[in-house]
Image (tube, grey):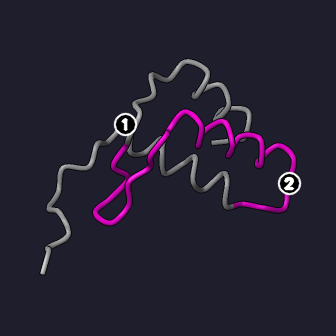
Amino acid sequence: MTEQELIAYFETANLPETLRLDRASTQFEVKEAVARNIEIMQTDLKNSNAKHRLMMIVHALEHPYSGPEIPSR
């Protein structure tokens, strides 16, 4: 996805408050995280971390994690 496609995707996405990204990662305050990462992506073109994080959120929204939890000791 291009930066413009990501921005367009999140303009219409229904974002939950908390989103499980994968087995070890949970994104809290999803709406704020998306806004912050879009701003970083637009202002710091050399920083690919924000785009990567947005792509992780897109993937988690489209393919919710349903695997095992991290085992507790």
Q: Position of residue 57 (x, y in %)?
A: 48, 45
Badge 1, how many Cα within 10 Å: few under 14, some, many 20+? few
Q: Residue at x 77, y 48 (%)?
A: 40
Q: Does residue 18 appear to the left or right of 12 in the view shown?
A: left
Q: Mark 1 — residue?
A: 62
Q: Does residue 44 appear to the left or right of 53 in the view shown?
A: right
Q: Does residue 33 appear to the left or right of 45 in the view shown?
A: left
Give the spatial CA distance, label 1 vs label 2: 27 Å
Which stretch did the figure color magenta? 19-48
Q: Nearer the viewer, residue 18 or 4?
A: 18
- List the single residue furthest toward the bottom: 73
Q: Residue at x 37, y 36 (%)?
A: 62
Q: Residue at x 60, y 56 (%)?
A: 52
Amino acid type of disc 2?
Answer: Asp
- The quadrant the C terminus occupies is bottom left
Amino acid type of disc 1?
Answer: Glu
Residue 47, by quadrant, is bottom right
Q: Mark 2 — residue?
A: 44
- The mark closer to the camera, 1 or 2, is 2
Q: Position of residue 28 (x, y in %)?
A: 44, 46
